Image: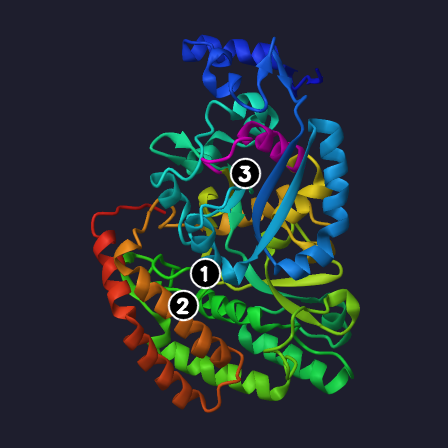
Amino acid sequence: MRKTSRKKGCGVLSVFIMLIVMFVGCSVLKSSLFSSSTTPVVEGQIDTSRYVKLSMFLAGPSSEEAIMDYKDTVAQLNAKLKDSINANVEITFVAFDELDREYPLIFNSKEIYDVVYTSSKATPGYFTMVEQESLQELDDLLPVYASNVWEMIKPSIWEDARYKGKIYGIPLCQEKYRANGYIYRGDLLEKYEIEPLISLEGMEEFMDTLLEEEVGMTPIGMTEDSAMSLYDMLVDLNPDWIPAPGIPHSSLYLVSKSRDNISSILCPVFSTEFMEFAKEMKDWAEKGYWREEVLTEDRIAGLDSGKDASMFVNLCDLSNGFSEGKYKFFCFGEGNHKVIKESAATDLLSISADSRNGERALMMLEFIMENEEFKEFLTYGIQGQIFKGVKEKDMLDYYENISIKDPYGKFTFDASPVEQEIQNVVRVNSQYGIPILLGKAGDPETAVKKYREELKAAGIQKVIDTVQEQLKDFTHMY
């Protein structure tokens, strides 16, 4: 029998187990939870003698792109998992912009999986999945099968992941901020003696200069998916709007009318600001700020390629820093003190309630999270490779000082009364909203008018009314 001894950072597992027994009042090791699993604890040691194949759904790029980018890394991971915990994992990537369509299909199909990416802002949301008993409770398992992760993550972060006092997901980030912005080459800024960018006007000056002076370089690297980054820019530059629940945030979402009244909800598409923004994006597209074939581009060349001078990012999604000497970053929410500190429940990894290998899955997640090489495809993505250099603590301290807490962080939206309307709105957003944002919908006034009509027909007002009704009794504090 092969036995793997698991240690904490400051003590062996047996000591930790004794503490569990003392505090819980009964021996966890004698429970059926452990004895009937594929990874039992035998005489104080975790028994991994039985080889286990795991499956994991992650949010990320399209499956085809993910296979191309990550196949070597996943092969290396599986080789090490075999040696370490006698397991391997098959990873399926679900594209970020397909989450709200693919996830319900996956869950309704009753497909068996072990690990799944969950988020309070996805559809179905993390808290909804807990209520539907789709996820395993982890409180007893974490201290035994992922003791280092259990100790590494701060109690305040675990608190975000709790629902009715219980934990059903492992937070991917200790702290995460809505640091949406524009990252650009600092050497070009210096070359043309332009001040650091802090406004749309500054961005335009920078990009106009590049169009005039830099042959063969595109000012912004963009794909169709980048349209949502433009929408984030519109929302974050507005001093009043706070991203609200109701419509998935992978689509053109709802916002609060003001940060002081979060129960009053607005669809920005019906605002004057959106109409003016649509006209501006049409102008940007016609100037050539992004490539003509943006609607069919499937990947961004990247800043290191010399073909793109900038790109849109959420800095916290890509990495824990970037080289400030080489790149500069304009955070859209910084100027109006609206960088939102998100709840840890927006990015989690959970174990399926139907998994037969939950304990080994936790061991796998701990192995990945302790190894920076493999942790990247859980948190940063391939693009994160170019943004290294600034220490994590420095960046997190900076955003902590200028952030506000997500006022909707503990709010659970029940989408069941308007599921069909939400699907209709997401479809209309994709069909009409995305081309408008990319300047590819013809005359902006005509296009926006048609878009608004389609949203009304899709049931946008019913969704807004439902969100506002559910927010009536919700209290928050920044």
Side of 216 where 198 appears, left or right? left
Instruction: Name the residue: 53% across, 72% down.
Output: 227
Q: Is residue 359 magenta?
A: yes
For label 3, the SS is: loop
Is label 2 in contact with label 1 (beta carbons under 8 Å)?
yes
- Residue 467 seen anywhere in this rendered image of the structure: yes
For label 1, the SS is: helix
From mark 2 to mark 1, how far is it between C-alphas? 9 Å
Q: Earlier in the sequence, mark 2 or mark 1?
A: 1
Please state which amino acid type lies under the numbered disc 2. Val
- Residue 324 seen anywhere in this rendered image of the structure: no
Quickly name the residue at label 1: 101
Q: Nearer the viewer, residue 212 or 465?
A: 465
The x and y percentages for residue 391 are 68, 44
Please state which amino acid type lies under the numbered disc 3. Asp
Which residues, given as a range, are shown in magenta?
352-368
- In which quadrant will I find the N terminus? top right
Q: Which numbered marker is on residue 426?
A: 2
Is label 3 in contact with label 1 (beta carbons under 8 Å)?
no
Please state which amino acid type lies under the numbered disc 1. Arg
Quickly name the residue at label 3: 114
Side of 65 where 202 appears, left or right? left
Side of 429 where 328 appears, left or right? right
For marks 2 and 1, give the one nearer the viewer.
Answer: 1
Q: Quadrant of residue 3?
A: top right
Q: Earlier in the sequence, mark 3 or mark 1?
A: 1
The x and y percentages for residue 294 are 62, 78
For disc 2, the neighbor class at 10 Å (few under 14, some 14 to 19, many from 20) is many
The x and y percentages for residue 333 are 49, 61
Up-down relation of residue 278 to residue 316 (above or below): below
Instruction: Name the residue: 72% across, 45% down.
Output: 74
From mark 2 to mark 3, how far is it between C-alphas? 29 Å
